[in-house]
Amino acid sequence: MYKIPFLDLPPLRSAAGTVRLPGSKSISNRVLLLAGLSEGTTEVHDLLDSDDTAVMLDSLKALGCRLETSDHGVLQVTGIGGQLKVDAAQLFLGNAGTAMRPLTAALALLAATQGGSFELSGVARMHERPIGDLVDALRARGCQIECLGQEGYPPLRLSGPSALDFSAPVQVRGDVSSQFLTALLLALPLVAQQQPIVIEVLGELISKPYIHITLELLKRFGIAVEREGWQRFTIPAGSRYRSPGAVHVEGDASSASYFVALGALAATEAPLRIEGVGSASLQGDVRFVEAAQAMGARVEAGPNWLEVRRGSWPLRGIELDCNHIPDAAMTLAVMALYADSPTTLRNIASWRVKETDRIAAMATELRKLGATVEEGPDWLRVQPLQSWQAAAIHTYDDHRVAMCFSLAAFNGLVVGKTTPSVPVRILEPHCVAKTFPDYFETLFSVAKARSKDIPVICIDGPTASGKGTLADEVAQALGYVVLDSGMLYRASGLAAQRAGADLDDGQAVAAIAARLDLHFSRGRVLLGDDDITDALRLETTGLLASKVAAHSEVRHALHQLQLDYRRLPGLVADGRDMGTAIFPDAPLKVFLTASAATRAERRYKQLISKGISASIAGLRQDLEARDLQDKSRKASPLAPAADARELDNSALSIEESKDLVLDWWAQAGSFADQR
Ligand SMILES: Nc1ncnc2c1ncn2[C@@H]1O[C@H](COP(=O)(O)OP(=O)(O)OP(=O)(O)O)[C@@H](O)[C@H]1O
Ligand SMILES: Nc1ccn([C@@H]2O[C@H](COP(=O)(O)O)[C@@H](O)[C@H]2O)c(=O)n1
């Protein structure tokens, strides 16, 4: 996951390959609650690992459920069997509506029948998300619920005992959020032993497919709810949660929408395959596929897979009632930028009470890209975009805003010769952890950019000037890949030496360098079967590397390997000739120096800290000899590129050097004023 303040996406141009979706959030949290309320143990396979499931798991643990994870990642939940194990708990539920609403209903009913006091709270935004309709429905039947802040909103205190009365139906509004009805359906079997319980929905029920998921999962846990249309539901008398033994969580259909869109936009050669959802999916958001098809996508589906490729291009603008796909429909708003006519999304009032006001958020951020957008209380209209602007997208701590705006980076596909393609900056990208922690890594595994659009920062300089340290720091701050090119020369030197090659024979060493069998595993470096991690960092290996690096044949043999490190979302490359020979088009080249005395002292401290004895004078002699050899060779000698920025860090801390380079980078890019 990218735990960084922003992630820059260069213009992207195509997509190919296979993605495996994380488990569905809606199914994961429903299954966890049902397993937690059931008697016995439920094995949960393919559970989503995310912020929203983490808060549900923490709550179940606090309520006395036993949770154990097997070596194969299967979670075993031993439930409370409808009997409270604790009489008080304070549960923090982050911004997870799928945890807050059902736990409110379950704990209100348990407290009423068995006594106890439970406080449920979340992040600030959760305290702005209405829950009054659910609270009113439960209070009307005798539950004691206090709103500890504003009436109708969390945080809440649920306490008891109190008398419950189900002689009349439980009435709940269905036109603001279907999660209130889901919460009641999941929790009311707790009190339906003696009599049937009827739920009546007031107003037109929105997001019916989510209720379908709830009913299907209840069935698997032994509760057969009877339904009359979408207005009246009856939980039969004698209902009791029974663990089905094992449950497999299907992939998240809302998360699939980004990749369905990606296929429609950018899978021109071969289909993009999406594994985890398909025609047999329980989730309503799988019907996003129909909307994507209406916009032009070509889709094939199996029971649990989809294959999507570009059909019509540009996409076709559509007008759609999105009530059945409220979450996935956000993706359509970004696809609309690539259409031939306006797209209007209707019946999306529920967007206003989600993680953020999603209608306002989408309109604001689409306009930053240059789009013309109109909005109403429950609709959004987006015009196709001709002239794209680089934009820093605010994500409002909303995972879906972050994920769907990543699709704006595919403007590389549409812009003409006169209007250049632009990068897109996603601010606070870690908000995707709510449902899809590895979203961007997954996107980068299938998206392609032109090599020259992938940004590179080169850090060259003499031995022990701090290149590797600075490269790691800068890469971490930007979420970039790192190339330690010196390691490739070191490994080539070691491999040649171990093979008994003549180190003065450039061709012989180059043949070995071209076939380097290097593997990286858990922080260790393996050459074939040998762990060479420690040997690589020895000073003698540095000298060996310097010797073999002088051969132009060896440099040639390693050239392509180094170019291959230019991967999304960007690269920080450290070495001697990154800026002069390997990445001459890099937008930022840093030539990092420090006085010989400083460098010798730093290397001394570095070795001593690893328990390796050394003398400062000896080290200084070695590094000066190595620098001389590196500077005076004919093939790509150590030298600053003509357009490099020189940085003498003798008097700077690592942090100061990093901040300076990041400032230079900010000035070099399209986001100079947007950090
Ligand atoms: N600005 C700095 N201030 C203090 N110490 C630093 C600074 N930069 C790097 N160091 C320290 O100097 C030592 C050498 O740094 P590093 O290994 O990054 O250098 P290098 O240029 O990559 O070396 P080599 O050329 O051998 O690969 C490390 O212990 C590192 O922590
Ligand atoms: N781009 C590069 C990187 C390194 N070398 C040679 O390898 C030696 C070891 O490098 P370290 O950065 O790991 O110390 C170095 O002295 C150079 O001779 C190179 O030529 N080009």
Image (cartoon, grey):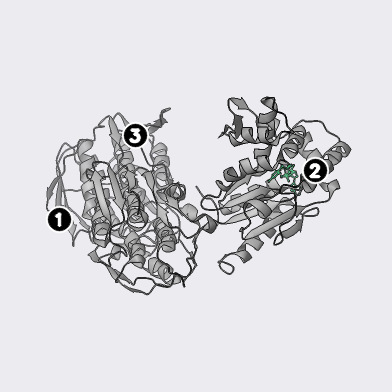
Q: Name the residue under label 3.
A: 45
Q: Is mark 3 on a helix, strand or loop?
A: strand
Q: Closer to the N terminus: mark 2 or mark 1?
A: 1
Q: Is residue 191 visible?
A: no
Tell which tag, 3 or 1, sits nearer the viewer. Answer: 3
* x, y percent for residue 501: 69, 27
| Label 2 beta carbon less than 8 Å to ligand 2 | yes
Amino acid type at mark 1: Gln
294 versus 633 height, above or below: below
* x, y percent for residue 452: 54, 57
Check the image and name the residue furthest to the left.
228
Q: Closer to the N terminus: mark 3 or mark 1?
A: 3
Q: Mark 2 points at which residue?
A: 629
Amino acid type at mark 2: Gln
Q: Nearer the viewer, residue 307 or 212?
A: 307
Q: Residues within 10 Å of mark 2 (few under 14, many from 20)?
A: some
Q: Is residue 342 visible?
A: yes
Q: Name the residue under label 1.
A: 231
